[in-house]
Image (spheres, rainbow, N blue to C red):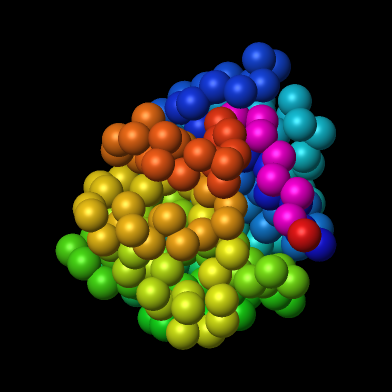
Amino acid sequence: MYTIIETYNNIPFDPALTPAKGFSCYIPEASLLFDTGGDAAVLAANLRTLDIDLAEIKTLVLSHDHWDHVGGISAVLGKNPDLEVFVPAGFSEEKLAAIREQARATVTGEWREIEDGIASTGPCGGSIPEQSLAISTPEGFLIVAGCAHPHISRIIEIVKGHGPVFGAIGGFHTISEADRAALKTLAYLAPSHCTEDLEVIVKENSGRIHPGGAGIQHILP
């Protein structure tokens, strides 16, 4: 069983945490951080408040190289000498070189298991190279998306090639009719961050929506 703690989000939830533009979440059972938000000081402060030790983070997965997902990386680099960073193929070469000065870095070009029960989708197509996480649960995969620039429907389609999809959380940037239809097939939804038409999505998926925001914890089955 995995727990996903939203450590950075522009949508507030826990008043003890600072909301700021960006997204990040932590899976303590795997010591895995997904994205770093946009500001290192905010990320570090939020992690301290949540009693998450930066030195214990052993895996960092970056969804894509936009500033509000990688801007906080300096809070993480250099804290654990064994840190491994996963970036999608097409990630900024300049940023990748800077990461490799302080950590091991792996470029994912396709579906790849990162930890037991946690996989990267690899880049999902479109003009912005972006990977998402797919976390295995007894009810199917839960997708963790940074922004879902390739469209959440496309990400769901890719993950379905490896098994049923139970839910999706994170940012669902641009929402198309196909995205709205795909979201209606999922049992667990927690859209936040950059999600367009958030109120519409919440209304259309009443009963399956869960809150997203800084400090939220998703306890998976």
Residue 196 location, quadrant: top left
State the image coordinates of residue 89 (x, y, percent, origin top left).
Answer: 35, 74
- Please tell me whether residue 165 belongs to the stretch shown in magenta: no
Relative to 12, residue 120 above or below:
below
Q: Is residue 33 left or right of residue 173?
A: right
x 44%, y 51%: residue: 146
Given the current orientation, which residue lies at the most extreme left position? Answer: 127
Is any atom of residue 179 visible in this view? yes
Q: Position of residue 60 (x, y in %)?
A: 59, 58
The spot of residue 154 in percent (x, y) is 32, 69
Q: Quadrant of the N terminus?
A: bottom right
Instruction: Give me the residue at 47% from left, 75% from top.
Output: 159
Q: Is residue 50 above or below residue 93?
A: above
**Residue 144 visible in the snapshot:** no
Residue numbers of the magenta segment: 214-220
- How many numbered discs sit on the rendered protein? 0
The quarter of the rendered structure image containing the C terminus is bottom right
Residue found at x 69% / y 16% = 16
Q: Name the one closer to the observer, 32 or 173.
A: 173
Q: Percent position (x, y) of residue 118?
A: 65, 71
**Residue 142, above or below 33:** below
Residue farthest toward the top in the current orientation of the protein: 15
Give the camera-side residue of 101 and 35: 35
Residue 114, image quadrant: bottom right
96 left or right, relative to 45: left
